[in-house]
Image: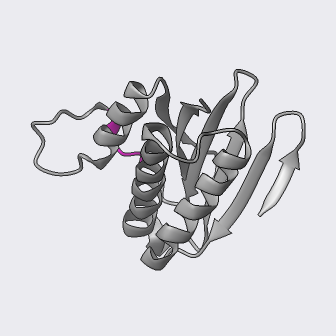
């Protein structure tokens, strides 16, 4: 894990695209969030656990074949929030952040978006110039 900036802290770590890595990613992100001021117990950290699990699982399942390593970035923002991004090398950007509950499958990102919004945050997808994308969420630390 690398801390990239002290003013607004940033940590980044890579993990192989294997489902066994989901729990490790979840533990690392939660440990960082708690170190930066998120309460260790309660709805907010539970939301963070679920969100990280969903984002990393999606990257492993849907992009693992094109992704030698999944990059997880955790940033503190000037507004006192926590931004978590999961980057993979697959060019497809899921529309799931705009799907409805009537869809038969692919509701994981819709659930993420809903939980994050209920916690006072927001979510998005950022394609990159190299053909991959970062799916990210921003949550309040408190």
Location of the N terminus by quadrant is: bottom right
Q: Quadrant of residue 25?
A: bottom right
- Whether 41 is among the magenta residues is no
Lateral position of residue 128 relative to residue 58, left or right: right
Q: Position of residue 83 (x, y in %)?
A: 62, 38
49 w.r.t. 126: above or below: below
Residue that protrudes farthest toward the front in the picture:
41
Lateral position of residue 97 relative to residue 135, left or right: left
Residue that protrudes farthest toward the right in the picture:
6
- Whether 96 is among the magenta residues is yes
Q: Magenta span covers which residues? A: 93-97
Q: Position of residue 12 (x, y in %)?
A: 73, 56
Q: Nearer the viewer, residue 82 or 68?
A: 82
Give the main secondary structure, helix, strand or loop, of the magenta stretch: loop
Q: Residue at x 59, y 44 (%)?
A: 84
Q: Position of residue 21 (x, y in %)?
A: 52, 74
Q: Residue at x 46, y 41 (%)?
A: 42
Q: Position of residue 32 (x, y in %)?
A: 69, 52
Q: Nearer the viewer, residue 32 or 132?
A: 32
Q: Can residue 92 be seen at all in this image of the molecule?
A: no
Lateral position of residue 33 relative to residue 91, left or right: right
Q: Residue at x 61, y 55 (%)?
A: 29
Number of numbered discs overlaid on the protein picture: 0
């Amino acid at each position: 894990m690398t801390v990239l900036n002290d003013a607004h802290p940033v940590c980044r770590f890579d993990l192989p695209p294997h489902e066994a890595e989901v729990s490790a990613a979840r533990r690392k992100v939660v440990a960082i969030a708690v170190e930066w001021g998120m309460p260790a117990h309660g709805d907010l950290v539970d939301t963070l656990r679920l969100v990280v699990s969903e984002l990393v699982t999606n990257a492993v399942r849907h992009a693992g074949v094109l992704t030698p390593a999944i990059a997880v970035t955790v940033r503190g923002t000037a507004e006192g929030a926590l931004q978590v991004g999961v980057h993979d090398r697959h060019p497809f950007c899921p529309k799931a952040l705009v799907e409805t509950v009537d869809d038969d499958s692919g509701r994981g990102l819709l659930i993420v978006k809903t939980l994050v919004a209920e916690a006072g945050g927001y979510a998005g997808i950022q394609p990159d110039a190299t053909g991959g994308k970062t799916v990210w969420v921003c949550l309040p630390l408190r």
